[in-house]
Amino acid sequence: MEMFDHIGLAPRIDELRERCPGNRFHFRELTLDEQRTPTLDFGRLPGTQYNYYGKVNQNDLDRALRASLAANHALYPEYGVEYLDSVQDGDAVRVRLRHGGEEGTVEEVTVPWLVGTDGSRSSVRAGLGLAFEQREGASMSMSMVDARLEGFRGDRNWVNYYVSEKGFMLVTGLPGGKFRLYLAGELEKLLQDAPPQKAFQQGLDFFDTGARIAEMDWSSTWEIRKIVGETYSKGRVILCGDATHVHSPAGGQGMNACMQDAFNLGWKLALLIQRRAQPGVLESYGAERRPIAQQVTAGADRMHQILFNASIPVAERFKLTQDPAWHDEAILRISALSHNYRGVDGTLGSVELPASAPLPGDRAPDCVLSEQPPRMRLYDALRHPGFTLLVVPESSEQVYAAYAECASQLRRAFGHLVRTLLVTPVRVPGIDPDELLLDPLQQVQATYGGAANQLILVRPDLYIGFRGTLGETLGLQAYVGKWVPAARLGP
């Protein structure tokens, strides 16, 4: 949702989705009253306005994305086009495409870059000869249906996980009145002996949900695998999303992880296409995103333990849900707010920070600057395709002069690729109003920690790149300069 907000699409998604507070776990072998039903409460997520699940039908989301592309960029995705093969030739890639099925016409196009976002069975990846094999643990399968239910005794707003020694079932409501159901473990064997509607009904009865399937749209079964690819790009061919990693669907992290791959890649590829990037910028894509794929897999594994791991008794799985540390780690991982590039990117200067402060490499947390109209959040100031420098000063003419000089240096070096903002509780005479970010409650400093006169540089993909003091502008320029050649560094 934060990524959709960044491109102005969040309000439309809000109209399409149902709001879900989080997960509820129902353990069949244990006697629990409703008050003791373990939950994962996403309302506890800090630093975001989207502290919930947004449940949206895939076809509605697809239409909204296509409408946004058409309205904002006059771009229209082509369907029914098959990738055949490609050849890299110097600074271009020649790609063969087929339109209209096996008997259709073949087209050859030449492009500067080819991005394979074609899933876990990626033809683009296969053409590169890259391995993509599960190295540990046995794969398992899961089945899914969308159906209309009558008499369901649970709360359709929540994602309800039903857990037993024999397997797992998920039940949650969808926009439009239908329900999404999943079935896995021994219970999935019911599908071997009965048609999908009967098998899923037996699962609902097994967990005493009270629900009856009145109508079923479709069903699907797929294999759950756990793979993180070794290579994310080869020359001018780049892999993105499920073409580079697959994992357990526990927690529903897949789309977030794939979209974040694209968000990370997009701004770097844009700079390359515009001929504004330093050589080797694209190497950072795989270096940053592969550790994230491992973080996603680790988070999915934690949920997998609760839902699927038959080697752990149900009573022990229940105990895991009672650990506050497990709860907080789970919601931060599932929401992707804890994913970070620490150790891969980011520069920390001499600024002193409390232990809870976000560091370079962390996602930049959002905060409310003004509740009353005109309402303002920090992310409203970050909604542009460049870097954003937040300067949190103490109130003095000398500091304002230092800020003005810092902003001037950045403009000379990087033009409009770095937007500078002075974060102050009141307006400051002599400072361009477009460079002021009014924060009357000083929420930025409270959220990010640290003393006054600090610099916080946020990357185009909403991650912190640099933190330091107002006296460390050369270090700041050096950090930006590793991404973008500077016209002029220093004063």
Image: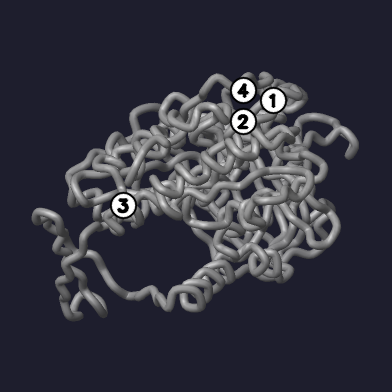
At label 3, the amino acid type is: Arg
Q: In the rendered view, tell whether residue 399 sits above or below residue 115.
A: above
Q: In the rendered view, tell whether residue 469 sits above or below residue 145.
A: above
**What is the number of the mark on residue 276?**
3
**What is the number of the mark on residue 454?**
2
Residue of label 4: 312
Sequence-first tag of 3 and 1: 3
Residue pictured at 67% horizontal, 19% vertical: 355
At label 1, the amino acid type is: Ala
Q: In this rendering, which labeled residue sits more in front, label 3 or label 4?
A: 3
Q: Nearer the viewer, residue 470 or 181?
A: 470
Identify the element where label 2 is drawn: strand
Q: In this rendering, which labeled residue sits more in front, label 4 or label 2?
A: 2
Q: Nearer the viewer, residue 49 or 220?
A: 49
At label 2, the amino acid type is: Gln
CA gap, disc 3 to disc 4?
Answer: 53 Å
Sequence-first tag of 4 and 1: 4
At label 4, the amino acid type is: Ile
Can I make out residue 225 in this image?
Answer: yes
